[in-house]
Image (cartoon, rainbow, N blue to C red):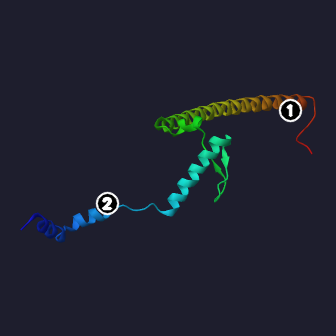
Amino acid sequence: MDNNEEMRQNEEVIDPLEAQLRKALERVDAPPTLIQFLETAIEAQEHQKRTGKLWFRPKRGGLLLTMPQSWRWMMSPWAGGAVAALLVAGVFLTGAHVHQEHVKQAQATQQFEQATQITDRALERAREKMKRAGVNLDQQ
């Protein structure tokens, strides 16, 4: 038995796992939608370089916003961390602001109660003075 015959026999008896692996690793053409997307992206990038405008209307589809080179830092890995840090800072500052508003509200409530007590005492004194003067406020 020569080498070629052995290879033919081995190819005929292919393990199912190996067959699946070969099928999975076969070259597949890109779907048309991906090709259209890439063409549109290239077209938008060329338009942005050529005109400097951020908005682009492709041959097919709606209006697109292109990202200039100076904004590409937003795509870096640390940009997500920076956004998260800003959100945490915003939550902290909002919490501090809400706390400050609660303190102001408590102070205003205390001042209102104090003013009400002072007014009640002043009205009571006025009633007593009028009663001593002979003015009866209970009659109607």
SS state under label 1: helix
Placement of 86 over or under 9, stated as above or below? above
Quadrant into which the N terminus falls: bottom left
When asked about the image quadrant of residue 59, the answer is bottom right
Residue at the farthest left position: 1
As drawn, the label of residue 9 is none
Residue beneath label 1, please?
127
Residue 118 is left or right of residue 39, and the answer is right
On the image, the x and y values in percent for residue 41 come to 57, 50
Observer-side mark, 2 or 1, equals: 2
Amino acid at dot 2: Leu
- Residues packed near mark 1 inside 10 Å, few (<14), some (14 to 19) or many (20 plus): some
Residue 10: percent from left, percent from top: 15, 67
Q: Position of residue 68 (x, y in %)?
A: 60, 39
Q: Quadrant of residue 61?
A: bottom right
Secondary structure under badge 2? loop
Q: Name the foreground residue: 2 vs 78.
A: 2
Residue at x 64% of width, y 43% of height: 48
In-image side of 98 versus 31 (left or right): right
Q: Nearer the viewer, residue 118 or 68?
A: 68
- What is the total number of numbered labels drawn onto the structure image? 2
Q: Tell whether label 1 touches label 2 (CB within 8 Å).
A: no
Local crowd size for mark 2, using a 10 Å CA cut-off: few (<14), some (14–19), many (≥20): few
- Side of 125 where 23 appears, left or right: left
Labels 2 and 1: the sequence-earlier one: 2
How many angstroms separate mark 2 from mark 1 (CA)? 100 Å
Instruction: Give the residue type at disc 1.
Output: Arg
Q: Pointer 2: what residue?
A: 25
Tell me the quarter of the image containing the C terminus.
top right
Residue 84, given in percent of the width and then of the height, sits at 51, 38
Residue at figure coordinates x 72%, y 32% from the top left: 113
